[in-house]
Image (cartoon, rainbow, N blue to C red):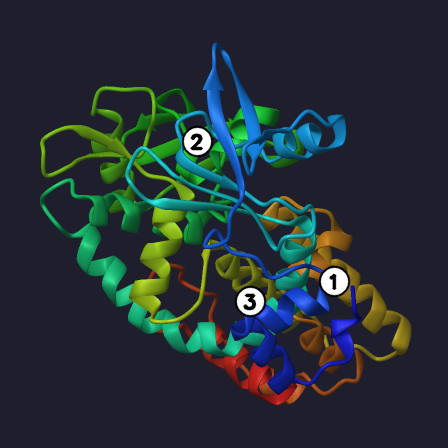
């Protein structure tokens, strides 16, 4: 894959929108399910696969398909006929929504370019939060209300979005795959306890009374899944990562997803850490402070220091601090972020200025 770190902000934004160009940069084949693909057919308790009428029996090809962890509940399954396809599989879930499985290199490229859409994401946050606030206030347990509650939980606790594939393969959970057994209620608080990605145990206390109340309403709906709602037909339905990301895209009016919340949170918390530190008087102190900030972010997000530095803290923010050019942005009396409120906090407004500087 080509080195995207040397690209300009404008070039990053281009490949973020032009998927054909992006696939080429990742040494992948731009391929969609409009082309003929591999078919999945139920055969007893397992599946058989065929392409253009011929059965697929090659061990490597079967292993590639199995690694995609396509849920049994998906219908109209399409699988990329080539291992290099930027989309590896699509299907329709139980809620009638189209779902995707992407190539690992595609995810890697999107991770490398996501810092360059942070400013646009920050611009969209007030609009998104206004929509969230409106939907969670609904008296009915609609899909919109439950999705909004899930996103607010994700924003306030930094829990990953989760997906059925990780739950099935690794027994790990995220917001959309949480079960009733993962939450307990004491007074006006919700206490979450579950195994997250890479086997990390999470114990989180949610103090937001309104959100805790909605979680309790969700748990009171029969069924194992925590986030459920009643459809227009009166039947119980569950949410998934695709529904959450579709909500975010529509409400924010931009090509954003749940991952952008974690990138935003990581950079924002690093900025807050730098604000709380004494002015460094030497290069070693600067480096020490950067490591300390990254360690603080790692605790918040549940990732290692290196992962936080690579994927969740904007490199331009660290560069400005390293060059002692961040201090003018910090000022005095910057209050801590109040997650979930409409608009942007004082710290978030400063982050927007920093992001604009980073270009």
The answer to whether marks 1 and 2 mark residues whose Cβ atoms lie closer than 8 Å is: no
Q: Position of residue 122 (x, y in %)?
A: 45, 74
Q: Which mark is residue 283?
A: none
The residue at 84%/80% (across/down) is 281
Tell me the residue that label 3 is attached to. Answer: 268
Mark-to-mark CA distance, 3 and 2: 24 Å
- Residue situated in front as seen by the camera: 6 or 173: 6
Mark 1 or 3: the one toward you: 1
- Residue situated in front as seen by the camera: 40 or 320: 40
Of callouts 1 and 2, the N-terminal one: 1
The residue at 53%/60% (across/down) is 265
Secondary structure beneath dot 3 equals: helix
The answer to whether marks 3 and 2 mark residues whose Cβ atoms lie closer than 8 Å is: no
Q: Quadrant of residue 81?
A: top right
Quadrant of the image containing the N terminus: bottom right
| Vertical order, 171 against 154 (above or below) | above
The residue at 63%/73% (across/down) is 21
| Vertical order, 131 against 34 (above or below) | below
Q: Is residue 355 visible?
A: yes
Q: Number of labelled discs? A: 3
Tell me the residue that label 1 is attached to. Answer: 27
The residue at 24%/32% (across/down) is 237
Q: Position of residue 187 (x, y in %)?
A: 27, 30
Of callouts 1 and 3, the N-terminal one: 1
Q: Is residue 172 visible?
A: no
Answer left or right for 334 relative to 222. right
Answer left or right for 296 relative to 178. right
- Residue situated in front as seen by the camera: 55 or 294: 55
Tell me the residue that label 2 is attached to. Answer: 192
Quadrant of the image containing the C terminus: bottom right
> Is the residue marked by circle 1 packed among few (<14), some (14-19), or many (20+) residues within 10 Å?
some
């Amino acid at each position: 894959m080509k080195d995207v770190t040397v690209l300009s902000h404008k070039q990053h934004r281009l490949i973020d929108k032009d998927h054909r160009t992006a696939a080429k940069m990742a040494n992948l084949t731009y391929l969609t399910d409009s082309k003929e693909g591999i078919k999945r057919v139920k055969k007893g308790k397992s599946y058989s696969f065929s392409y253009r009428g011929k059965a697929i029996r090659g061990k490597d090809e079967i292993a590639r398909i199995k690694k995609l962890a396509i849920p049994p509940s998906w219908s109209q399954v399409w699988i990329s006929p080539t291992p290099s396809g930027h989309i590896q599989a699509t299907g329709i879930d139980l809620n009638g929504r189209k779902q995707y499985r992407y190539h690992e290199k595609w995810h890697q490229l999107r991770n490398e370019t996501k810092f360059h859409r942070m400013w646009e994401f920050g611009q969209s946050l007030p609009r998104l939060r206004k929509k969230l606030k409106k939907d969670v206030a609904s008296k009915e347990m609609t899909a919109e209300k439950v999705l909004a509650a899930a996103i607010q939980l994700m924003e306030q606790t930094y829990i990953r979005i989760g997906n059925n594939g990780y739950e099935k393969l690794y027994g790990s959970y995220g917001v959309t795959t949480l079960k009733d057994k993962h939450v307990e209620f004491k007074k006006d608080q919700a206490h979450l306890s579950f195994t997250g990605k890479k086997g990390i145990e999470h114990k989180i206390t949610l103090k937001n009374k309104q959100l805790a109340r909605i979680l309790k309403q969700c748990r009171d709906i029969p069924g194992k899944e925590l986030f459920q709602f009643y459809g227009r037909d009166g039947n119980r339905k569950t949410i998934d990562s695709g529904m959450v990301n579709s909500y975010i895209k529509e409400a924010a009016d931009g090509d954003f997803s749940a991952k952008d919340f974690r990138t935003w949170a990581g950079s924002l918390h690093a900025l807050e850490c730098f604000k709380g530190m004494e002015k460094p008087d030497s290069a070693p102190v600067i480096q020490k402070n950067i490591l300390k900030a990254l360690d603080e972010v790692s605790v918040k997000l549940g990732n290692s220091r290196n992962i936080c530095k690579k994927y969740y803290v904007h490199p331009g923010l660290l560069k400005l601090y390293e060059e002692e050019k961040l201090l003018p942005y910090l000022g005095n009396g910057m209050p801590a972020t109040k997650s979930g409120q409409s608009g942007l906090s004082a710290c978030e407004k400063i982050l927007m200025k920093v992001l604009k500087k980073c270009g």
